[in-house]
Image (spheres, rainbow, N blue to C red):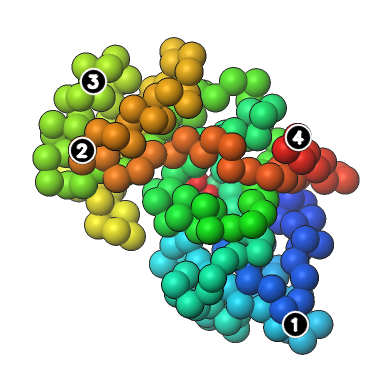
Amino acid sequence: MENPGKIAAATAALSYIEDNTVVGLGSGSTAKIFIEKLAERVAAENMTLTCVATSHFSEDLGLKLGLNVVPLDEVTSVDVTVDGADEVDPQLNGIKGGGAALFFEKIVAKASKQNIWVVDPSKESPRLGSFKLPIEVLPFGSGHVFNYLADMDLDPTFRMLDEQTRLTTDSANYIIDVDVSKVDDLHALGDELIRHTGIVEHGLFLDICDTLIVGEEPARVINRH
Ligand code: DER
């Protein structure tokens, strides 16, 4: 049985999608529900949409459901992207990457005129850091990046598929998860991480979300001021 909060949030996001627009398809379990419901609406209302995906999984799902999914470079911009999040604070800053899709998600988000996040209530937090921050790193020299993060007292761990196998992303990179619960200035941390050679991207999505939809009955909508 799917989480009712996820269903409520994903359903509420449908009202933001207009015909003849470009829609970003997020990744994760809540975004999956949105994609499924969007495909139903497109078929029922004979809508004309162009979609771009934030992961191979979402691309395959959209295509399987009959959505017109195209490569990001085939559109000049995205009108609305609907995505999930792992943790969101009252300023609509968030941590993403629980599904290891943060790199493509951030590329699509930055190309989007409006970013909508759909979450169940458990994702809301007064302060980011309860969820470990995912960092996407190049496999080459990843041990040195790991040590750099350890020296920053961020308690790094490689994301594993099983005891022997490191997870690899759609871009064939690794994910290192770190503890940022003791970090006061996440903007400064994000700026430092992205400058470190070997780090491809991180899951701090700051000043990106425009509208947060929380899956309650009725759905609670918070817009960035
Ligand atoms: O990786 C991500 O950021 C995804 O959006 C995902 O982790 C969101 O979580 P969900 O599966 O609970 O929607």
Residue 91, quarter of picture: top right
Q: Which mark is residue 225?
A: 4
Calculate the distance from the C-alpha at mark 1 to the C-alpha at mark 2. 44 Å
Residue 135, quarter of picture: top left
Foreground tag (3 vs 2): 2
Q: Is residue 160 left or right of residue 39?
A: left
Which residue type does callout 2 highlight?
Answer: Thr
Q: Which mark is residue 197?
A: 2
* Residue labelled with disc 3: 150
- SS class of the residue under badge 3? helix
Question: Label 3: few (<14), some or many (≥20) within 10 Å?
Answer: some
Calculate the distance from the C-alpha at mark 1 to the C-alpha at mark 4. 31 Å
Foreground tag (1 vs 4): 4
* Residue labelled with disc 1: 47
Which residue corresponds to the image point at 67% horizontal and 54% vertical from the top-left?
Answer: 114
Which residue type does callout 3 highlight?
Answer: Ala
Which residue type does callout 1 highlight?
Answer: Met
Question: Label 2: few (<14), some or many (≥20) within 10 Å?
Answer: few
Q: Position of residue 173 (x, y in %)?
A: 25, 51
Q: Position of residue 11 (x, y in %)?
A: 76, 59
Calculate the distance from the C-alpha at mark 3 to the C-alpha at mark 1. 50 Å
Disc 4 C-beta below 8 A from ligand 1: no
Question: Label 1: few (<14), some or many (≥20) within 10 Å?
Answer: some
- SS class of the residue under badge 1? loop
Q: Earlier in the sequence, mark 3 or mark 1?
A: 1
- SS class of the residue under badge 2? loop
Which residue corresponds to the image point at 75% horizontal and 82% vertical from the top-left?
Answer: 47
In this rendering, the answer to whether 183 lies above or below 107 is above
Which residue type does callout 4 highlight?
Answer: His
Q: Earlier in the sequence, mark 1 or mark 2?
A: 1
